[in-house]
Protein backbone atom coordinates (compact mmCIF):
# COMPACT_ATOMS: atom_id res chain seq x y z
CA UNK A 1 0.00 0.00 0.00
CA UNK A 2 1.27 3.44 -0.89
CA UNK A 3 1.69 6.09 1.82
CA UNK A 4 0.06 9.40 0.99
CA UNK A 5 -0.03 12.80 2.65
CA UNK A 6 -3.14 14.89 2.00
CA UNK A 7 -2.95 18.65 2.54
CA UNK A 8 -6.28 20.40 2.82
CA UNK A 9 -6.80 23.95 1.63
CA UNK A 10 -8.45 26.60 3.85
CA UNK A 11 -9.11 24.32 6.81
CA UNK A 12 -8.91 25.70 10.36
CA UNK A 13 -7.19 28.87 9.21
CA UNK A 14 -8.61 31.90 10.95
CA UNK A 15 -11.81 30.06 11.84
CA UNK A 16 -12.72 29.40 8.21
CA UNK A 17 -13.55 25.85 7.20
CA UNK A 18 -13.56 24.42 10.70
CA UNK A 19 -12.91 20.68 10.73
CA UNK A 20 -11.77 18.80 13.83
CA UNK A 21 -8.81 16.58 12.99
CA UNK A 22 -10.59 13.62 14.66
CA UNK A 23 -13.33 14.06 12.05
CA UNK A 24 -10.79 14.23 9.22
CA UNK A 25 -9.24 10.97 10.45
CA UNK A 26 -12.69 9.34 10.66
CA UNK A 27 -13.55 10.43 7.10
CA UNK A 28 -10.31 8.86 5.84
CA UNK A 29 -11.10 5.63 7.65
CA UNK A 30 -14.65 5.60 6.21
CA UNK A 31 -13.11 5.91 2.74
CA UNK A 32 -11.05 2.78 3.43
CA UNK A 33 -7.72 4.53 3.89
CA UNK A 34 -5.58 2.60 6.37
CA UNK A 35 -3.51 3.87 9.31
CA UNK A 36 -4.87 7.43 9.04
CA UNK A 37 -3.24 9.99 11.31
CA UNK A 38 -3.38 13.76 11.38
CA UNK A 39 -0.72 16.34 12.15
CA UNK A 40 -1.50 19.73 13.72
CA UNK A 41 -4.80 21.51 13.16
CA UNK A 42 -4.25 22.87 9.65
CA UNK A 43 -5.55 19.93 7.63
CA UNK A 44 -2.71 17.44 7.23
CA UNK A 45 -3.48 13.72 7.15
CA UNK A 46 -1.35 10.69 6.33
CA UNK A 47 -2.67 7.27 5.36
CA UNK A 48 -2.14 4.19 3.25
CA UNK A 49 -4.15 3.25 0.17
CA UNK A 50 -3.94 0.87 -2.78
CA UNK A 51 -5.64 3.46 -4.98
CA UNK A 52 -3.91 5.93 -7.30
CA UNK A 53 -3.05 9.40 -6.03
CA UNK A 54 -5.66 11.21 -8.13
CA UNK A 55 -8.40 8.75 -7.09
CA UNK A 56 -7.52 9.23 -3.41
CA UNK A 57 -7.47 13.01 -3.87
CA UNK A 58 -10.90 13.08 -5.55
CA UNK A 59 -12.52 10.72 -3.03
CA UNK A 60 -11.26 12.72 -0.05
CA UNK A 61 -12.18 16.10 -1.54
CA UNK A 62 -15.71 14.85 -2.40
CA UNK A 63 -16.22 13.39 1.10
CA UNK A 64 -15.02 16.61 2.71
CA UNK A 65 -17.36 18.57 0.44
CA UNK A 66 -20.30 16.53 1.72
CA UNK A 67 -19.22 17.10 5.33
CA UNK A 68 -18.27 20.77 5.07
CA UNK A 69 -20.82 21.90 2.49
CA UNK A 70 -18.05 22.91 0.09
CA UNK A 71 -15.00 21.12 -1.24
CA UNK A 72 -11.94 22.62 0.45
CA UNK A 73 -9.41 21.48 -2.14
CA UNK A 74 -7.08 18.58 -1.39
CA UNK A 75 -3.50 18.19 -2.57
CA UNK A 76 -2.10 14.66 -2.22
CA UNK A 77 1.58 13.79 -2.35
CA UNK A 78 3.43 10.51 -1.97
CA UNK A 79 6.17 9.98 0.60
CA UNK A 80 8.76 10.07 -2.20
CA UNK A 81 7.40 13.39 -3.48
CA UNK A 82 7.62 14.91 0.01
CA UNK A 83 11.19 13.65 0.38
CA UNK A 84 12.10 15.30 -2.93
CA UNK A 85 10.42 18.57 -1.89
CA UNK A 86 12.48 18.65 1.30
CA UNK A 87 15.70 17.61 -0.46
CA UNK A 88 15.38 20.25 -3.20
CA UNK A 89 14.74 23.40 -1.18
CA UNK A 90 16.05 26.24 -3.37
CA UNK A 91 16.66 28.70 -0.52
CA UNK A 92 18.98 26.92 1.92
CA UNK A 93 19.75 30.15 3.79
CA UNK A 94 16.07 30.71 4.65
CA UNK A 95 14.77 30.09 8.15
CA UNK A 96 12.46 27.05 7.84
CA UNK A 97 9.47 28.94 9.26
CA UNK A 98 10.04 31.76 6.73
CA UNK A 99 10.01 29.35 3.78
CA UNK A 100 6.58 28.21 2.61
CA UNK A 101 5.96 25.40 0.18
CA UNK A 102 2.76 25.96 -1.79
CA UNK A 103 1.21 22.70 -2.92
CA UNK A 104 -0.81 23.12 -6.11
CA UNK A 105 -3.38 20.82 -7.72
CA UNK A 106 -1.27 20.73 -10.89
CA UNK A 107 1.90 22.25 -12.28
CA UNK A 108 1.54 25.94 -12.97
CA UNK A 109 2.60 27.76 -16.12
CA UNK A 110 6.34 28.19 -16.52
CA UNK A 111 5.89 31.99 -16.69
CA UNK A 112 3.82 32.17 -13.46
CA UNK A 113 6.53 34.04 -11.56
CA UNK A 114 6.51 36.87 -14.09
CA UNK A 115 3.30 38.13 -12.45
CA UNK A 116 4.89 38.21 -8.99
CA UNK A 117 4.97 41.46 -7.03
CA UNK A 118 7.39 41.09 -4.10
CA UNK A 119 7.74 44.40 -2.23
CA UNK A 120 9.55 42.87 0.76
CA UNK A 121 12.19 40.99 -1.20
CA UNK A 122 10.31 37.69 -1.33
CA UNK A 123 11.80 35.06 -3.60
CA UNK A 124 9.93 32.25 -5.33
CA UNK A 125 10.89 29.15 -7.28
CA UNK A 126 8.68 26.87 -9.37
CA UNK A 127 9.15 23.14 -8.90
CA UNK A 128 6.53 21.03 -10.66
CA UNK A 129 3.34 21.11 -8.59
CA UNK A 130 4.98 23.21 -5.89
CA UNK A 131 6.13 26.77 -5.52
CA UNK A 132 8.67 27.57 -2.84
CA UNK A 133 8.40 31.09 -1.43
CA UNK A 134 10.96 32.62 0.90
CA UNK A 135 9.56 35.45 3.01
CA UNK A 136 12.63 37.24 4.46
CA UNK A 137 10.41 39.19 6.91
CA UNK A 138 7.89 36.38 7.50
CA UNK A 139 4.65 35.76 5.66
CA UNK A 140 2.30 37.37 8.20
CA UNK A 141 2.59 40.94 6.95
CA UNK A 142 3.91 40.24 3.49
CA UNK A 143 2.33 42.11 0.59
CA UNK A 144 3.45 39.46 -1.91
CA UNK A 145 1.16 39.12 -4.90
CA UNK A 146 1.48 35.92 -6.90
CA UNK A 147 -1.76 34.73 -8.56
CA UNK A 148 -0.38 31.22 -9.17
CA UNK A 149 -0.56 30.53 -5.41
CA UNK A 150 -4.34 30.94 -5.20
CA UNK A 151 -5.47 27.36 -5.94
CA UNK A 152 -2.93 25.86 -3.56
CA UNK A 153 -2.25 25.43 0.11
CA UNK A 154 0.97 26.19 1.92
CA UNK A 155 2.99 24.66 4.73
CA UNK A 156 6.21 25.97 6.18
CA UNK A 157 9.35 23.92 5.72
CA UNK A 158 9.29 22.69 9.35
CA UNK A 159 5.83 21.19 8.77
CA UNK A 160 6.81 19.67 5.42
CA UNK A 161 9.87 18.07 7.02
CA UNK A 162 7.75 16.64 9.84
CA UNK A 163 5.17 15.27 7.38
CA UNK A 164 7.95 13.65 5.33
CA UNK A 165 9.35 12.07 8.51
CA UNK A 166 5.91 10.82 9.56
CA UNK A 167 5.30 9.39 6.07
CA UNK A 168 8.64 7.54 6.18
CA UNK A 169 7.75 6.13 9.61
CA UNK A 170 4.32 5.04 8.36
CA UNK A 171 5.89 3.38 5.33
CA UNK A 172 8.36 1.59 7.59
CA UNK A 173 5.44 0.27 9.64
CA UNK A 174 5.88 2.49 12.70
CA UNK A 175 3.00 4.37 14.26
Image (cartoon, rainbow, N blue to C red):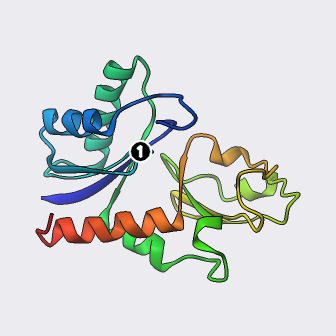
Q: Position of residue 70 (x, y in %)?
A: 44, 21
The answer to whether residue 125 is above or below residue 77 is below
Q: Report which quarter residue 161 is drawn in.
A: bottom left
Q: Report which quarter residue 20 is drawn in.
A: top left
Image quarter hosting the C terminus: bottom left
| Res. 81 visible in picture | no
Task: Spot the residue most to the right.
Answer: 119
Q: Residue at x 12, y 39 (%)?
A: 32
- Pointer 1 residue: 41
Q: Residue at x 22, y 33 (%)?
A: 27
Q: Position of residue 128 (x, y in %)?
A: 52, 62
Image quarter hosting the N terminus: bottom left
Secondary structure beneath label 1: loop
Q: Position of residue 33 (x, y in %)?
A: 15, 44
109 displayed left or right of 66: right
| Res. 161 visible in picture | yes
The answer to whether residue 79 is above or below residue 154 is below
Q: Residue at x 23, y 40 (%)?
A: 25
172 displayed left or right of 63: left
The answer to whether residue 94 is above or below residue 19 is below
Task: Spot the residue most to the bottom.
Answer: 93
Q: How many marks on residues? A: 1
Q: Nearer the viewer, residue 166 or 107?
A: 166
Q: Residue at x 74, y 58 (%)?
A: 113
Q: Nearer the viewer, residue 107 or 80?
A: 80
49 displayed left or right of 161: left
Q: Position of residue 124 (x, y in %)?
A: 70, 65
**Is disc 1 surrounded by few (<14), some (14 to 19) or many (20+) residues within 10 Å?**
some
108 displayed left or right of 59: right
Amino acid sequence: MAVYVALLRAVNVGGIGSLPMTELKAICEELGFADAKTYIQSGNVLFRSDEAEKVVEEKLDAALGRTMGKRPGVMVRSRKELDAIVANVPFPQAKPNFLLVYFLPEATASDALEKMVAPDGEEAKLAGREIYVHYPNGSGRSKLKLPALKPGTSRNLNTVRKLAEMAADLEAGES
